Amino acid sequence: MKTKHSKKDVTKKVLNLGKNPFMRTVFEVFAHSPYRGFNFKQVSSELGISDKPSRILVNNLLEELMMNEAIVEIKRGKYKLNPELITETAPAVEVVGTVDMKQTGKAYVMVPGADEDIYIAANNVYHALHGDKVKVNMFPKRKGKKPEGVIVGVLERFRKQYVGILKITPHIAWLHPDEPNILVDFIIPKDKLMDGKNGQKVVTNIIEWPDDSTNPIAEVIAVLGTPGNNDVEMQGILASYDFPIAFPRNVEREAETIPEEIPETEITRRRDFRKVWTCTIDPEDAKDFDDALSLKKLDNGNWQVGVHIADVSYYVRPGKSIDAEAYDRGTSIYLVDRTIPMLPEKLSNKVCSLRPNEEKLCYSVVWEMDGQANLLNEWIGKTVIKSDRRYAYEEVQAMIEGGDGDYKPELLTLHQLASCLRDERFKHGSIAFRSAEVKFKIDEQGHPIEAYVKEQKEANRLIEDFMLLANKRVAEHIGKVNGKETPKTFVYRVHDEPNPAKLATFIEFVGKLGYPVKSTSQKSLSSSLNKLFIQISGKAEENLIESIAVRTMAKAEYSTQNIGHYGLSFKYYTHFTSPIRRYPDLMVHRLLERYMDGGNSVPVHEYEEKCEHTSDMERRAAEAERASIKYKQAEYMLDKIGKEFQGVISGVSKWGIYVEIDAFKCEGMVALRTLMGDNYILEQENYRVIGQRRGKVYRLGDRVQIKVMRVDLSRKQMDFILVE
């Protein structure tokens, strides 16, 4: 019978772990991340262990630590620090996480793998800014309270550059940052203005931040120009996320030396698909076509389907300037009015782009399928193709809906096979997340003249389903091994299971709206969510619920540690299909070729670092893209002041209710002080505000009519009032 020990006994046992240095080292992984769960593979990775005997030893030590109650098993094979020890160990350790700064001055620190974010009071944020990587000293855990701590150091700034409006007086100059969650102004010495003028938009970096100073000291490194100018604002967004505006000259020169003609000797090394019907399907305004589909009817009645991906690795070699620049960027960025490519234009739009009627080098996955898309044979290798036709999504969608067009039978066959793949994926637990994309028509000066919502249709999903299959099969090709082998180091696209607390909050929220969601297993959750998305289709709360559902889930990222992809319900998944615009795909191509040629496994630490960098650049690009959309939405609303619109309540806070306009998804705030006839207070647990005297309720998901009162273009914010 197992005896329950007191906290004092457990602590004594933990202190005695020092007699076994290796056990103490394993324990410290948990002590330094007291709210995070680890399995033996993740502990091994933290310690830099990759050989099989040492990983077995780690697994044995975890069992012993659990027997000593130093750690607890939170689910099968996954452990975290015994909560009873947090008050004993946490003050002596510094937890590392990322700052989510709120406009009120308080912050939350997000620790990878932790069940809850750490609350930081406004007077304990030290010199941290939004997005920074920081060290936190934990306060003793109080029963029923969220984890709380104090930031004691900034390890890494999220931004190297800060954009804002320059303010100059006879006595002092400072920067007022554009970002609403950067709550301090930057002091700028007069000799660091770089000829910037009062009221101009500039780029700065922080020179120093003395311990006894409330404000950092900065210098101007670039003057962008007059606020409100489209180029100034878009360049400002790019600078805010440390993205470059142009390629260095040496990179452009290197790109120019790349020949456009393919050597005949290279063609003979590859499988020839030039006479097989092939097409690309992309957005109307796309220029970088990095994926193509081929289709051929076989003599036995089955179908040969090929996914052909631009062979960027043939042209972009490790050690070259182009490769170094692509790695630094990590991804292409798609702002509202421009694309900032990962590769120079000669590569992204010409040499590598799978343009119609041009011979192109590819890395391909080719299947033999029956009429129900069952895989009968598979081949992965280098090819040469010649696309017969370039389609926009709208053209293919019109044919799917009954219209005529070039190669309609081939496209409808691909559509039918893709539908079978999709049905099978959902049957196995894939979640059908949907997203509405805000698009703009802009004039020659870059000003938005129309805003609309664009939804994904069957033509988009046709391409998506084949790309998902290719990504999955490539990951399985490398990651699946028999019991005697150790998987080679690879770049996976992973998606962890949702945080239980966030999931419980979401289930409670949709339950109060009348939509029950089951979460007893991954399959029951995915089935419930897919049913939910069907139920809310076309309703006022559709976009709100879908966006909250996405935020509830963990964020997908790149890693050498394969934990599977929860949202897709794939045990193995990677990104193989977009090497023109994503650096991880280029890494996958290189590793796949290396391993298929019999090469040794690459160092896990080197590639984990690359995964972390490219994950970070992907997040930055997504934030920059959202910032450009929010700016254009605010700009579009400038001449709508005084006009009324239908919307849905998308958020509630103690300051006001947030309303998203139906027509083009612009969000603004209705301040509680503007709600006449009562004193309204927030009921956070019920997602609503309620009048104290008359009981009038405004809750998340309610449809309302608003009037636009004010637009703050510099902060991308809008103020509304309710129209009864």
Image (tube, grey):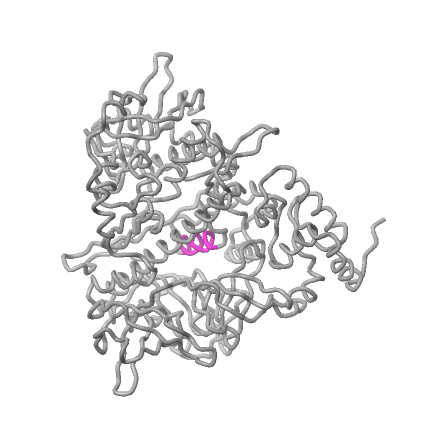
- Please state the extent of the stretch shown in magenta in the rendering: 541-551
User: Which residue ends up furthest to the right in the rendered image?
Assistant: 1
* Front one among 520 and 363: 363
- Relative to residue 434, is residue 664 drawn left or right? left
* Front one among 604 and 286: 604
Q: Could one spot residue 531 in this view of the protein?
A: no
Residue at the spot 40% in from the left edge and 40% down from the top edge = 587
Residue at the spot 60% in from the left edge and 58% down from the top edge = 33
Whether residue 542 is situated above or below residue 365 in the rendered picture: below
The image quadrant of residue 236 is bottom left
The image quadrant of residue 420 is top left
Whether residue 549 is situated above or below residue 348 in the rendered picture: below
Residue 495 horizontal/vertical position (percent): 49, 46
* Front one among 475 and 712: 475
Residue 213 horizontal/vertical position (percent): 44, 80
Residue 585 horizontal/vertical position (percent): 38, 40
- Relative to residue 635, is residue 464 drawn left or right? right
- Relative to residue 590, is residue 137 drawn left or right? right
Residue at the spot 26% in from the left edge and 51% down from the top edge = 340
Q: Is residue 350 magenta?
A: no
* Front one among 131 and 406: 131
Q: Is residue 549 magenta?
A: yes
Whether residue 120 is situated above or below residue 559 in the rendered picture: below
Q: Could one spot residue 461 in this view of the protein?
A: yes
Quadrant of the image for the C terminus? bottom left
User: Which residue ends up furthest to the top in the rendered image?
Assistant: 299
| Magenta span dominant secondary structure | helix
* Count of all numbered marks drawn on residues in the image: 0
User: Which residue ends up furthest to the left in the rendered image?
Assistant: 444
User: Which residue ends up furthest to the bottom in the rendered image?
Assistant: 171
Residue 349 horizontal/vertical position (percent): 22, 41
